[in-house]
Image: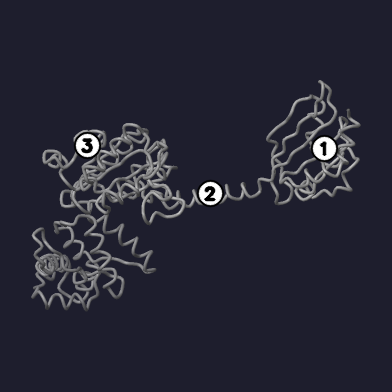
Amino acid sequence: MESNLIEISKDPLFNLIFNSVKDAILISDRNGIVLFVNHEYSRLTGVKQKDILGKYVGDVRKGARLPDALKTGRPLRGIRRKVDNIEYIADVHPIIINSVIIGGISVLHDITEIVSLSNRITSYSSKIKEFHKASHSLDDVIGISIPIEKIKKQIERISFSDASVMITGESGTGKELFSHAIHNASTRKEGSFVAVNCAAFSSQLFLSELFGYEEGAFTGAQKGGKIGLFEIANNGTLFLDEIGDMELDMQSKILRVLESHEFIKVGGTKPIKVDVRIISATNKDINQLIAGMKFRSDLFYRLNVVHFEIPPLRSHPEDIPCLINHYLKKFSRIFHRTLTIAPAAIEILSKYKFPGNVRELFNIIEFAANSCDNGQIEAEHLPIIKDRHGKASELSDLVKTSERELISKALNRYENSVKGKHMAARELGISIATLYNKIKQYGIIHQHKNR
């Protein structure tokens, strides 16, 4: 029987057939002596036919597993190998006729392109994950006030929980920053953090953004379809910002995903399982929306397992100085220069009510940082601020009252002399020329009595 195998391996038709297949093939006798290799085998392994035919496969191909199959009579599958830049999987089988092993066959499947594609997909997935990454942690939650410290401790307490979180608060209080901190403090911190603004899309567009779509799902759908945000957020966190603006039909679809942990792409039929934590945020009164039939109560209960109310900045003004300092450091790095702020400017900002909250303070510091010439932010560098009713008024009233008070106090601590004024200017963080100008501007009388 073995002699028949030798004869067959020499047959021209046999050679034609096996040289026309895409896989690499090696055939040996029962002792592992190579009888045949096709052209693809030589290309894949780099071994020429003349160098392997008639030789023991284990001598020419170090680590070959065909001898093991010949010895045990059992096939071996899925053996992964790499030669230079070519990767392949080998399957080896004994050739058995009438319970007798007469030879063996090794079939190699070139997986180089598959591996390359897999690597590209992995790289693409990593880039997607890097793009959808929470950029803030608890260290970025700036504040020493009791309300802020309380929230930070609560975030730490729920760090091992997967419960849904709802964050409420006025516009500009930093709800998204807190959502980042919650994600990065959780066990899902290595997963994606995907943020979506619920007010930015129509229902149909929102559906395709959240769930993705199959190719040809609708006119204009991109070739190959699109992965949805729920799928990108799998094993991570999906942040639904402005949840109070989500339309009712979308609310029901979100609820269904939260209940079943699966969804179907637009134009698709196959359910996709997901493991996603939901953090939502709104500046609206959800209870009022529920009463007005604009928000589903069952979705609210699903989303509001853990609740954070972010206080407006006016309720914790003691955090304003440290927020200012934090923003100055940030803009110092951006502008590549050291930025400072005069006490008078701090005094003014500390008295302001900030209807736009921390976002407004950030914008004020950014404006002032761009306006000051020597790196020192003075009161006059502060921009126009609007009150709650939208009435624009320059900071002149606050500037005049606060600056005059600060300068008067500083002057009165020192003697009425040139030296005393220099010391007062140093304390105020302004130049002596600026001090003299302010004294003249506000008509300040130096009341300290010389001794």
Q: CA distance from mark 1 to mark 2?
A: 36 Å
- Say which element carries label 3: helix
- Say which element carries label 2: helix
**Is residue 339 positioned above or below 15 on the image?**
below
Q: Amino acid at mark 3?
A: Phe
Q: Position of residue 325 (x, y in %)?
A: 29, 58
Q: Position of residue 212 (x, y in %)?
A: 38, 47
Q: Amino acid at mark 1?
A: Ile
Q: Earlier in the sequence, mark 2 or mark 3?
A: 2
Q: Earlier in the sequence, mark 1 or mark 3?
A: 1
Query: As drawn, is 438 to the left or to the right of 233?
Result: left
Label for residue 27?
A: 1
Q: CA distance from mark 2 to mark 3?
A: 37 Å
- Residue where numbered disc 2 is placed: 121
Q: Position of residue 155 (x, y in %)?
A: 31, 39
Query: As drawn, is 166 to the left or to the right of 51?
Result: left
Residue 217 visible somewhere in the drawing: yes
Query: As drawn, is 325 to the left or to the right of 285?
Result: right
Q: CA distance from mark 1 to mark 3?
A: 67 Å
